[in-house]
Amino acid sequence: MENLIAGLEMLARWDVMLALLVGSIGGVVIGAIPGVGPAVAIAILLPATFSLDPIVGLTMLLGIYGSSMYGGAIPAVLINTPGTAVNALTSYDGYPMTERGEAHRAVSLAYSASFWGGIFGILCLILLSPVLALIAPMFGSREIFLAAFLGILLVILAHRGQIFAAGLLAMFGIFLQTVGLDAVTYTQRYTFGYSFLSSGVNLIVVVLGLFALSQAFFLLTAPDNSPDAKPVTGRMGAGIKELLRHKRVATVASGFGVILGMIPGTGEFTAQFMSYTYAQKTSKNPDQFGKGSPEGLIASEAANNAVPAAAMIPLLALGIPGEALTAMMLSVFYVHNVIPGPQLFQNNIDLVYGLYFALIALNVIVMVFLLFSTNLLTRVIRVPTRFLGVMILLLSFVGVYSLRNSLTDCMIASAFGVLGLILKRLNLPIVPIILGMVLGGIMEVKLRSALPRLKTPLDMIDRPIAAILFALIVLVVALHLRTLVREWRAHRPTDDHDLHDSQMR
């Protein structure tokens, strides 16, 4: 009870409430603008949050993270252009409903399903917190190393069809975090005699380059576009009643979001597709999916909005981010010397409960805001893309320069911006680089801490949790190899004639 009261008192502070309002409403606006997205916004705001209290900075970033998907549903439904990448499935059934003249119904359903998924995910997070408080102290250096290794492995394997590229990019991220002065031996690593590399490659500089600057370059080099969305007429609250008729689909979809949100590297996309598939297979009208099915829209939005709260579980309990956005939040913890992991639930439990209440409040604020401002947000969709590119470019350079007042950082960020643009043009993932930097740093520190206590390699897994994590790593690799063998057998020539045909082709 004392922890609950402390969390409520922390949320009641005027600066925390202001940060929550700015983050929540700003996240909706950012999500509603195609071409920006929460990663770009959080990357730009990240340097500004370092001067704020941890709860204030994290509340603002959580507001953007948790509310952007609400806003992303608006252009997905109205103009068939997802505001954020994770709203792609929303357009499958939302836009056909708009074409039938049911735009208000589709938008209202999307809001209601998002609210259902968001609250469901937060309740699961709160219920799991006592379990986290008990299990987290059992994680020592070797367990956290193995958990981080499992996380980066899952991130790589999650990029089906691009696993080799994702692996190389993750290794590049691990390499980047080794550059600079070694904190243990005080030796230079990969600096090549350049003094500006002695302090290492700053994570925030890389984040701003890969996400914000690359998106600015992408928008500036693409044809200018001003999407047109027509105003929505009708009751925005009508979707709540319709959602209750499909509460089974909403609950199962939210459950998928929670489970997959806790697993690094999976996140919203996998949760959406599994939820959408489940809804279609169990529906009485499966032929309506992709043609304006309310169940498909509910499954998509409930799943992706349950993920943000669930993604906080490995971040808070183990200090291990599962995606780029939680990796950015981890840097806010580190700047204020608040280290997520086993000690957080013992030493800073009021901060944890403050974040829980902030997540609940942001969903309520966003829902109320959207019920009265949807038509206002349709005007935001019309912002020209090149104007957005110029604004992102300007704000990104301001953010990079404000970190250390360094033009060198601006040049490094520009280089990573060009790299991010190249990766986007080649349709290659950017996230493995960021998670490689973050998880690679965790792995190095924890492995160095664990090695002096180990006499043989088997000592690394001689404790129950370490053995379970190692077994999971082996199981994940074995399942992936099994999938590769099945795919190879399915595509290999079955006889000499097929072999001759494949050679001729």
Image (spheres, rainbow, N blue to C red):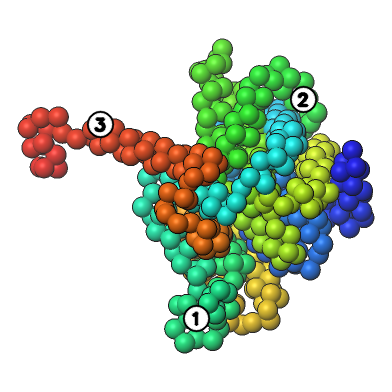
- Is residue 223 shown to the viewer in this render? no
Q: In this orientation, which residue lies closer to the viewer: 282 or 226? A: 282
Instruction: Name the mark nearer the viewer: 3 or 1.
Output: 1
Q: Quadrant of residue 126?
A: top right
| Residue 182 located left or right of residue 375 | left
Residue 181 vs 473, above or below: the answer is: below
Q: Residues within 10 Å of mark 2 (few under 14, many from 20)?
A: some
Q: CA distance from mark 3 to mark 2?
A: 46 Å
Q: CA distance from mark 2 to mark 1?
A: 59 Å
Q: Secondary structure at mark 2?
A: helix
Q: Residue at x 67, y 36 (%)?
A: 306
Q: Secondary structure at mark 3?
A: helix
How far from the left and from the top, in percent, is residue 55? 81, 55
Q: In this orientation, which residue lies closer to the viewer: 249 or 30? A: 249
How far from the left and from the top, in percent, is residue 202? 59, 71
Q: Residues within 10 Å of mark 3 (few under 14, many from 20)?
A: few
Instruction: Name the mark nearer the viewer: 2 or 1.
Output: 1
Residue 240: give its label: 2
N-terminal of the two: label 3 or label 2? 2
Residue 198: give its label: none
Residue type at mark 3?
Ala
> Which residue corresponds to mark 3?
490
How far from the left and from the top, in percent, is residue 20? 82, 51
Residue 188: give its label: 1
Instruction: Name the mark nearer the viewer: 3 or 2.
Output: 3
Q: Residue at x 72, y 23 (%)?
A: 243
Q: Secondary structure at mark 1?
A: strand
Residue type at mark 2?
Ile
Residue type at mark 1?
Gln
- The residue lying furthest to the top in this view is 284
